[in-house]
């Protein structure tokens, strides 16, 4: 078994075609496609996920390379309107967390959580979460309200540092939105780093035309 390069690229093109069609014609199809592919494909590029993987506050999965491409493209010319709208909250690397505690199987590309070695898949019964800011991924049932520290790096877990990956229930989705609001109100980015204040973000005014050429005394 296994897919050769040709069938992989065929699948990729097919997914793109379906996605384009769905985005314009049928949002229901898009949702179905998302639930099937969201564990194995980068949300932005539609390419197979490859380590290093990052995630936003909504628990979406992306290839880190693609997020960097996204951030370096202020015009977002390579993305469709829906993507630009859906991922507009990703404006800097602090808006995503680098996921750790994962391994990728060479032959299949499947992503596994090192804790328990379960694979990322939509049909699997195992749900996954990650902790911020460390980014360590665990099966959801490992991390509960009474878990005090990250089982991997021993970082203390405080409220709002647990993010469900690819949440399904509206309750989980709402929880992530609430968490993000709270994190923002605390003056932090999704990854826990301090937001820059307006003062430090203020750009120096552009020099005026006259200012560009210093007049020298005759
Ligand atoms: Zn950790």
Image (cartoon, helix red, strand yellow):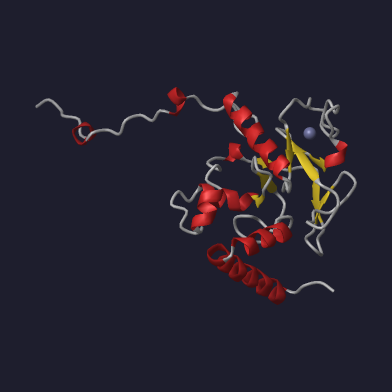
> Where is the N terminus found, in terms of image quarters?
bottom right
* Left/right of residue 40 with respect to residue 23 in the rendered view: right
Image point (66%, 56%), residue name: 42
Could you tell me residue 146's position as x and y percent?
86, 27
- Res 198 → quadrant: top left
Judging depth in this view, the residue of 115 and 164 nearest the camera is 164
* Left/right of residue 204 with respect to residue 187 in the rendered view: left
Image point (78%, 56%), residue name: 122
Judging depth in this view, the residue of 176 and 154 nearest the camera is 176
Q: State which image quarter holds ligand 1.
A: top right
Judging depth in this view, the residue of 71 and 13 nearest the camera is 13
Q: Residue furthest left?
A: 218
Q: Residue furthest right?
A: 116
Could you tell me residue 35's position as x and y percent?
71, 57
Image point (61%, 52%), residue name: 65
Above or below, 216 against 53 in this view is: above
* Left/right of residue 201 with respect to residue 190 in the rendered view: left
> Where is the C terminus found, in terms of image quarters?
top left
Number of callouts: 0
- Res 5 → quadrant: bottom right
Above or below, 44 against 6 in this view is: above
Above or below, 17 against 61 in this view is: below
* Left/right of residue 13 with respect to residue 111 in the rendered view: left
- Res 208 → quadrant: top left
- Can residue 125 be seen here? yes
Could you tell me residue 7's position as x and y percent?
71, 75
Above or below, 134 against 16 in this view is: above
- Can residue 187 be seen here? no
Judging depth in this view, the residue of 66 and 84 nearest the camera is 84
């Amino acid at each position: 078994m296994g897919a050769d390069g040709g069938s992989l690229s065929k699948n990729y093109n097919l997914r793109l075609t379906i996605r384009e069609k769905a985005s314009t014609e049928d949002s229901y199809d898009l949702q179905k496609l998302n639930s099937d592919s969201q564990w194995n494909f980068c949300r932005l590029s539609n390419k197979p996920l490859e380590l290093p993987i990052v995630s936003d506050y909504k628990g979406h999965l992306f290839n880190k390379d693609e997020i960097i491409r996204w951030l370096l493209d202020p015009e977002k010319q390579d993305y469709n309107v829906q993507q630009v709208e859906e991922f507009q909250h990703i404006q800097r690397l602090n808006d995503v967390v680098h996921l750790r505690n994962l391994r990728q199987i060479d032959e299949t590309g499947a992503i596994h959580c090192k804790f328990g070695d379960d694979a990322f898949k939509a049909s699997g019964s195992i749900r996954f979460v990650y902790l911020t800011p460390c980014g360590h991924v665990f099966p959801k049932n490992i991390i509960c309200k009474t878990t005090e520290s990250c089982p991997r790096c021993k970082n203390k877990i405080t409220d709002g540092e647990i993010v469900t990956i690819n949440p399904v229930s509206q309750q989980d989705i709402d929880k992530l939105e609430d968490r993000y609001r709270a994190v923002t109100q605390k003056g932090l980015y999704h990854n826990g780093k301090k937001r820059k204040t307006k003062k430090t973000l203020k750009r120096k005014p552009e020099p005026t035309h006259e200012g560009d050429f210093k007049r020298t005394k005759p």
